[in-house]
């Protein structure tokens, strides 16, 4: 019976039309499925991904944590299908690495561009315009000995400032803000500083009493450095 009906469909005009319509519908369904899958793949490839891109030249040997804590990089949105393998998306992942080759402006930062460094070697944690300087502190001035590597601190000095009338009076002043601590051992704190900041710290440690205040891990902001005198405590 089925063979007879099939033969009629194939031999009659109506049957031919029905088969043609059925084939067209099937082809349309297959085309729609293909176009939908293609559109999804195109949309997925065009979806932007935030990756780290070199903002300026990163020279071979530059420490990763220096790159991650300075303006050597910027976050850029790049289509997913243009993101390189191993591209960095978080600057914290650069810590402990050094640039294995020069990375040029606009180039994505990838795992292939960096290699593991030696965290114990201070030179691998300093940019070309930075210096490491060690300043001794007693326990209280070092926030009770709680300063550790990776902290950010403000530097205060206490000294007797001479006024216009020739009379000296105790003065407390914040002289440096947001200084990065490379290490702290036995009361000796190692700072990452510019040459000028290094000189200021050395002078302060020799001529004044130096205190540190610990900054929050995130969200801290710089403000106008305050100067505190006896007037602020006792009034004029």
Image (tube, rainbow, N blue to C red):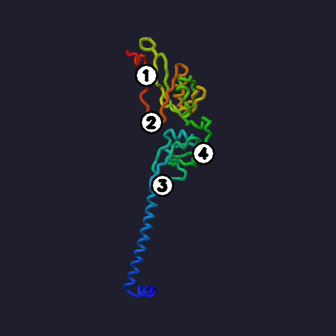
Element class at badge 1: strand
Q: Which residue is mark 1?
A: 227
Residue occupying image coordinates x 50% and y 41%: 72
Q: Earlier in the sequence, mark 2 or mark 1?
A: 2
First reached walking from the N terminus: tag 4 or tag 1? 4
Give the mark nearer the N terminus: 4 vs 2: 4
Q: Which residue is mark 3?
A: 80
Mark 4 in CB contact with mark 3 (< 8 angstroms): no
Sequence order check, earlier mark of 1 and 3: 3
Which of these two is toward me, 44 or 165? 44
Residue at 45% in and 50% down: 77
Count neighbours of disc 1 (C-alpha within 10 A) and say few if under 14, some if 14 to 19, many if 20 or more: few
Which residue is the site of mark 4?
A: 115
Residue 56 position in % (x across, y down): 50, 43
Earlier along the polypeptide chain: callout 2 or callout 3?
3
How far apart marks 1 and 3 lie (CA) works out to 51 Å
Label 4 crowd bin: few (<14), some (14–19), many (20+), radius 10 Å? some
Instruction: Report helix, strand or loop for mark 2.
Output: loop
Residue at which label 2 appears? 219
Q: Nearer the viewer, residue 24 or 95?
A: 24
Percent position of residue 89, x then y: 50, 47
Is residue 49 visible from the viewing direction of this image? yes
Residue sitting nearer the eye, 49 or 123? 49
Q: Cβ–Cβ below 8 Å for labels 2 and 3? A: no
Of badges 4 and 2, nearer the viewer stands 2
Q: Local crowd at mark 2 within 10 Å, few (<14), some, or many (≥20)?
A: few
């Amino acid at each position: 019976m089925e063979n007879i009906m099939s033969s009629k469909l194939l031999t009659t005009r109506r049957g031919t039309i029905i088969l043609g319509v059925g084939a067209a519908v099937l082809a349309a369904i297959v085309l729609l499925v293909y176009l939908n899958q293609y559109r999804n793949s195109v949309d997925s490839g065009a979806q932007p991904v935030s990756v780290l891109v070199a903002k300026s030249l990163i020279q071979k040997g530059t420490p990763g944590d220096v790159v991650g804590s300075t303006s050597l990089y910027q976050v850029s949105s790049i289509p997913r299908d243009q993101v390189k393998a191993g591209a960095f998306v978080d600057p914290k992942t650069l810590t402990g690495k050094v640039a294995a080759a020069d990375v040029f402006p606009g180039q994505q930062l990838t795992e292939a561009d960096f290699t593991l460094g030696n965290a114990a070697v201070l030179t691998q944690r300093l940019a070309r315009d930075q210096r490491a300087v060690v300043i001794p502190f007693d326990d209280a001035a070092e926030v009770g000995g709680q300063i550790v590597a990776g902290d950010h601190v403000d530097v205060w000095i206490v000294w007797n400032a001479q006024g216009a009338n020739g009379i000296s009076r105790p003065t407390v002043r914040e002289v440096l803000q947001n200084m990065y601590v490379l290490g702290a051992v036995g009361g000796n704190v190692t700072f990452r500083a510019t040459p000028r900041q290094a000189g200021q710290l050395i002078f302060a440690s020799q001529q004044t009493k130096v205190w540190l205040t610990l900054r929050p891990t995130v969200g801290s902001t710089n403000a106008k450095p305050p100067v505190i005198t006896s007037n602020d405590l006792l009034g004029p």
